[in-house]
Amino acid sequence: AGIFDYDYAPQSALIENRRVWINISQEGQSDIEFLREEELVNALILSSKSFKPVVLYQVSDNGSELLSRVGRNEKEIVNSFA
């Protein structure tokens, strides 16, 4: 309900050696980059079995501390979206 009002666009991706179309949000990617710049999210780059780069994300200690101050209602709104 307006929490994540992103525009999505189809994008081709290689997943387990298969070409698939997935919906990607440029605004969502930008938001993740912002969280990384603010040191609220960590990222780890690994290689897949087919040697393609894969990015894993984890809430940082700073992000975890910030989330501890978020109210239950706000968390439920986000969880219902995800």
Image (cartoon, helix red, strand yellow):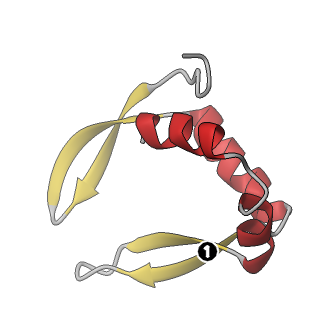
Q: Position of residue 52 (x, y in %)?
A: 36, 73
- Which residue is situated farthest in the right direction here? 38
The quadrant where residue 58 appears: bottom right
**Which residue is at the front of the view, 19 or 56?**
56
**Which residue is at the front of the view, 69 or 40?**
69
Q: Position of residue 62 (x, y in %)?
A: 81, 73
Query: Where is mark 1, residue-wise?
Result: 43
The quadrant where residue 65 appears: bottom right
Q: Residue at x 46, y 25 (%)?
A: 8
Q: Is residue 26 above or below residue 7?
A: below
> In which quadrant will I find the C terminus?
top left
Q: Residue at x 52, y 40 (%)?
A: 76
Q: Residue at x 59, y 35 (%)?
A: 26
The quadrant where residue 47 appears: bottom left
Q: Position of residue 70 (x, y in %)?
A: 73, 50
**Which residue is at the front of the view, 70 or 43?**
70
Q: Position of residue 43 (x, y in %)?
A: 61, 74
Left or right: 9 in relation to 16: right
Q: Could you tell me the amino acid type at mark 1?
A: Ala
**Which residue is at the front of the view, 7 or 48?**
7
Q: Is residue 18 above or below residue 53?
A: above
* Mark 1: secondary structure: strand
- Which residue is situated farthest in the front direction here? 72
